[in-house]
C-alpha cells in the first residue's frame, strides 16, 4: 500500500480549476482521470485521500480520486474519467463522476455503479407568477400546506392510488402516463430531459421485488423540495428519484452482473463497479430496467408537481393555470444514456454515464427543448443543472446554468449537480444541534418542514461544499455558465 | 426464499428474545454512512450490522416492539456476497409489504462453508405515527465492504446508501 506522499506523485495540477490523475494511480487505467476543483474544493478531495491512506486498509472508504481512477480502468471507456466540481466519494463511481463508453466496442461496459442506486434522481423547477410579497404573509401556511399535500420521509406511502397494472403502465410510459391520467399538463413534457419518457423501458425487466418496493412509494418525496424565489419571482423546485424501485433495479443488476463478469472475464478494481458488456443480455436487461425506473421517477416528479399546483391553488384561492405554474425544466443527474459525441473530430455513439452530474448541452443542440435552442428565446435557464444539495443557508441556494460548446468537448456536455457533501451525515448529526440549525433557518426567514427534526442537521451549511466555489469552478472551467440564482424561502424535506 | 410465503407470524408469549448489547457504530462517509459492527463471532457481527441498519431508520429504536417474527433465508458465493444478500433481504421486508422493522435480528443457521444464512427478525410493521422517522436506508453497497473474520472483534464494515 502506498503512502500519501507516494500517491501525490500521480496527481498533477493542470490549471487553477483542474487536476490530472495519471495512469498508475490505480491498476489497469485505460484513460486518465481529471477532476475540476478550485483551491478550496481540492483541499476536500486531498483530505479524503489522506484519510484513506491513514486507514491502512481497515475500514474507511475509497476516496473520490481513487473512484474516478477505478472508473478509468473500466473496459471501453473513451476520453477520460471526469470528476465535476461537486465530486466526492460515493460507491462505485464517485458522486459527481461521469464517463462515456464506446458503443461500437464490443468490450465496452455499462455499470449500474455509474448511474447510482436512485435511478433518474433529478430536479424539476416550476415557475409561478407570484412575487415574494404575495407569498410572504402566507409563507408558513404554504410550507405546511405543501408538507401536508406531499408525503415525505422513511415509511411514508404515496397518496395517488396505484394498482399493479398502473405501475406497469407508468414504468413503460413515464410522463405520458401522468398525462393520460390527468396529473400533468401536455406542455410539461416539452421541458423534460427525454421528454419525460425513455423509450427503451421494458417493465418486464424490472423484478417483482423492485415492483413491490415501487408500488407503495409512488409519490413519496426523497429529499427536498423548495419554494424559492428568483428576482422576486417565486418558483418551486422538486428533487426526487425512483427510490426503492430504482434501488432494487440496481441491486438486482449488480448481482446478475457479478455472475456475468466471471463468465465474460471482466475485471474491475472495485466490486461495486460490477458491470456487463453493453450488448450482453445482462447489459441490455439493465438498460431496459433502468429506463423503466427512470420513467417511474418522472411520474413521481410529475405527481409532486400536481400536488404542488393543488397546494398553491388552494392557498391562493385560484387555479394552477392562473398561477402560470409551468415546468421550466426537469433534468436527471443519475442516468446512463446513448448520445452522439465527437471524439478527435469523429462522431461516435457513446453510452454516457452521469452519476451525480447533469447533462448540460449548449444552445442549438437538437436534444434540448425547442424553446431553449435559441438563446434569446429562453424562458428561464437552459437545459441545465440545479443544485439540489445546496443547503438553504447560502444566498445562492440554487443555480441554474446553461450548457456550453466548451462543455461538449471537455466533459461530454456535463456539469455539476449540486454543492456536494463536505461533511458526513454521521458527523453532521453528532456535531451539530438541530435546534441551532432550525433557529439559523428562522433568522434567515426560511420556513422549513422536515419529517423528523433531527434530520435537519444533515442539511446544515457545514455539511456541504461551498456552492459558490462549485458553480464558479464550472463557470471558470467553461463547462457551464451561470445563468440565474434562486434563494430559498421554504423547504420541505423527507 | 419465496417472498409470498414470508408473511411472518405473531410472537407467542415469552418468545421475544432479550435485546442484545449494541455492538455497532456509524462511521463517517462523505455521502452516505458506514456501518461498523463487531461481535464474539462472525455470526454476531452479521446480526449486529443488520440491527445497525434498522437503528438508522428511526431516531428512537426503542419504540420498536417485538410483536411478530419474520424469517429470511439467503445464500451467497462468499462472505461478502452472503452479507450483501442477508442485508438486502432484510431491507426488502422493510421496503415493501409488510414494511417490517425488526428490533432484534437473530441468525439461526450460519453456514460459512456453503454461504447460507437463516435468520429471524423480531419486530413489527414500521408505523410513522409510532416510530420517529430516521434516515431511510435504500441500498446495500459493496463499496469497500470488509469482513475481518480472523480479527478478534470480527469487524464488519458496510457502506449503505441513504
Image: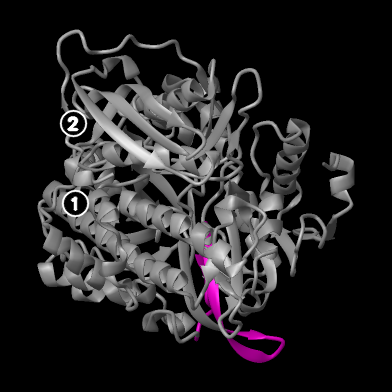
Instruction: Identify the image quadrant of the N terminus of chain A.
Output: top right
Chain bearing mark 2: B
Front in this rendered view, residue A51 or A221:
A51
For the point 18% across and 69% down, which residue is it?
Answer: A169
Instruction: Identify the image quadrant of the C terminus of chain A.
Output: top left
Residue A157 screen position, x and y as percent: 19, 42
Q: Which residues are magenta?
A: A341-364
| Quarter location, residue A289 | bottom left
Residue A373 numbered tag: none
Residue A482 visible: no
Q: Relative to A271, does residue B40 appear above or below in the rendering?
A: above
A37 horizontally vs A448: left or right: right
Labels 2, 1: one chain? no
Which residue, given by chain and number where applicable, does mark 1 sit on? Answer: A312
Residue A390 screen position, x and y as percent: 50, 46
Residue A71 visible: yes
Q: Chief secondary structure of the magenta span? A: strand
Coloured how?
one colour
Answer few, some or many: residues within 10 Å of disc 1's Cα (few below 14, many 20 plus, some between 14 and 19).
some
Residue A58 screen position, x and y as percent: 69, 31
Chain bearing mark 1: A
B151 horizontally vs A132: left or right: right
Circles 2 and 1 in contact, beta carbons < 8 Å: no
Q: What secondary structure is marked by label 1?
A: helix
Front in this rendered view, residue B100 or B8:
B8
Amino acid at each position: 500500500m502506498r503512502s500519501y506522499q507516494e500517491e501525490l506523485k500521480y496527481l498533477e495540477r493542470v490549471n487553477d480549476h483542474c487536476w490530472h490523475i495519471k495512469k498508475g494511480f490505480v491498476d489497469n487505467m485505460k484513460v486518465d482521470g481529471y477532476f475540476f476543483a478550485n483551491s478550496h474544493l481540492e483541499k476536500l478531495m486531498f483530505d479524503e485521500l489522506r484519510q484513506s491512506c491513514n486507514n491502512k486498509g481497515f475500514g474507511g472508504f475509497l476516496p473520490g480520486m481513487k473512484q474516478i481512477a477505478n472508473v478509468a480502468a473500466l473496459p471501453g471507456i473513451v476520453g477520460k474519467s471526469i470528476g465535476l466540481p461537486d465530486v466526492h466519494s460515493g460507491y462505485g463511481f464517485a458522486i459527481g463522476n461521469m464517463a462515456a463508453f464506446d458503443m461500437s466496442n464490443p468490450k465496452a461496459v455499462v455499470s449500474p455503479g455509474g448511474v447510482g442506486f436512485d435511478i433518474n434522481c433529478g430536479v424539476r423547477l416550476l415557475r409561478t407568477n407570484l412575487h415574494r410579497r404575495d407569498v410572504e404573509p402566507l409563507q408558513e401556511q404554504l410550507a405546511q400546506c405543501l408538507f401536508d399535500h406531499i408525503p415525505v420521509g422513511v415509511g411514508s406511502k404515496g397518496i395517488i392510488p396505484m394498482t399493479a397494472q398502473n405501475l406497469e403502465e407508468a414504468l413503460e410510459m413515464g410522463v405520458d402516463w401522468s398525462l393520460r391520467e390527468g396529473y400533468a399538463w401536455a406542455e410539461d413534457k416539452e421541458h423534460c430531459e427525454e421528454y419525460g419518457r425513455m423509450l427503451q423501458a421494458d417493465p418486464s425487466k424490472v423484478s417483482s421485488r423492485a415492483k413491490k418496493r415501487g408500488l407503495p412509494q409512488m409519490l413519496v418525496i426523497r429529499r427536498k423540495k423548495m419554494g424559492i424565489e428568483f428576482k422576486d419571482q417565486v418558483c418551486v423546485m422538486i428533487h426526487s428519484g425512483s427510490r426503492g424501485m430504482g434501488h432494487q433495479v440496481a441491486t438486482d443488476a449488480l448481482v446478475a452482473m457479478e455472475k456475468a463478469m466471471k463468465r465474460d472475464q471482466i475485471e474491475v478494481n472495485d466490486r461495486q463497479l460490477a458491470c456487463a458488456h453493453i450488448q450482453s443480455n445482462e447489459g441490455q436487461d439493465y438498460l431496459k430496467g433502468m429506463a423503466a425506473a427512470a420513467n417511474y421517477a418522472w411520474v413521481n416528479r410529475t405527481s409532486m408537481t400536481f400536488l404542488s399546483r393543488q397546494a398553491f391553488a388552494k392557498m391562493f384561492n385560484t387555479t394552477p393555470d392562473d398561477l402560470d405554474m409551468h415546468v421550466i425544466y426537469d433534468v436527471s443527474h443519475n442516468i446512463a444514456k446513448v448520445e452522439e459525441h465527437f471524439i478527435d473530430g469523429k462522431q461516435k455513439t457513446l453510452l454516457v454515464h452521469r452519476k451525480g452530474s447533469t447533462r448540460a448541452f449548449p444552445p442549438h443542440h437538437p436534444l434540448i427543448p425547442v424553446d431553449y435552442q435559441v438563446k434569446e428565446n429562453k424562458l428561464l435557464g437552459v437545459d441545465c443543472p440545479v443544485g439540489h444539495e445546496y443547503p438553504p443557508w447560502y444566498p445562492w441556494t440554487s443555480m441554474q446554468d446553461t450548457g456550453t460548446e466548451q462543455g461538449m468537448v471537455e466533459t461530454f456536455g456535463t456539469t455539476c449537480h449540486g454543492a456536494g457533501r463536505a461533511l458526513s451525515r454521521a458527523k453532521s448529526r453528532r456535531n451539530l444541534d438541530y435546534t441551532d440549525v432550525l433557529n439559523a433557518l428562522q433568522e434567515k426567514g426560511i420556513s422549513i418542514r422536515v419529517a423528523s427534526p433531527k434530520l435537519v442537521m444533515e442539511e446544515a451549511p457545514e455539511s456541504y461544499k461551498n456552492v459558490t466555489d462549485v458553480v464558479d469552478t464550472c463557470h471558470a472551467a467553461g463547462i457551464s455558465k451561470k445563468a440565474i440564482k434562486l434563494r430559498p424561502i421554504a423547504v420541505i424535506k423527507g | 426464499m419465496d417472498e409470498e410465503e414470508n408473511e411472518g407470524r405473531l410472537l407467542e408469549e415469552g418468545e421475544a428474545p432479550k435485546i442484545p448489547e449494541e455492538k455497532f457504530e456509524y462511521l463517517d462517509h462523505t455521502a452516505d454512512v458506514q456501518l461498523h459492527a463487531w461481535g464474539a463471532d462472525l455470526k454476531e457481527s452479521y446480526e449486529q450490522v443488520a440491527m445497525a441498519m434498522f437503528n438508522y431508520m428511526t431516531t428512537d429504536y426503542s419504540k420498536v416492539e417485538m410483536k411478530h417474527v419474520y424469517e429470511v433465508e439467503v445464500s451467497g458465493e462468499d462472505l461478502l456476497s452472503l452479507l450483501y444478500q442477508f442485508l438486502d433481504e432484510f431491507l426488502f421486508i422493510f421496503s415493501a409489504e409488510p414494511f417490517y422493522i425488526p428490533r432484534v435480528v437473530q441468525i439461526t443457521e450460519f453456514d460459512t462453508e456453503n454461504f447460507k444464512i437463516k435468520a429471524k427478525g423480531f419486530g413489527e410493521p414500521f408505523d410513522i405515527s409510532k416510530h420517529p422517522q430516521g434516515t431511510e436506508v435504500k441500498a446495500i453497497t459493496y463499496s469497500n465492504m470488509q469482513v475481518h473474520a480472523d480479527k478478534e472483534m470480527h469487524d464488519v464494515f458496510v457502506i449503505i446508501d441513504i
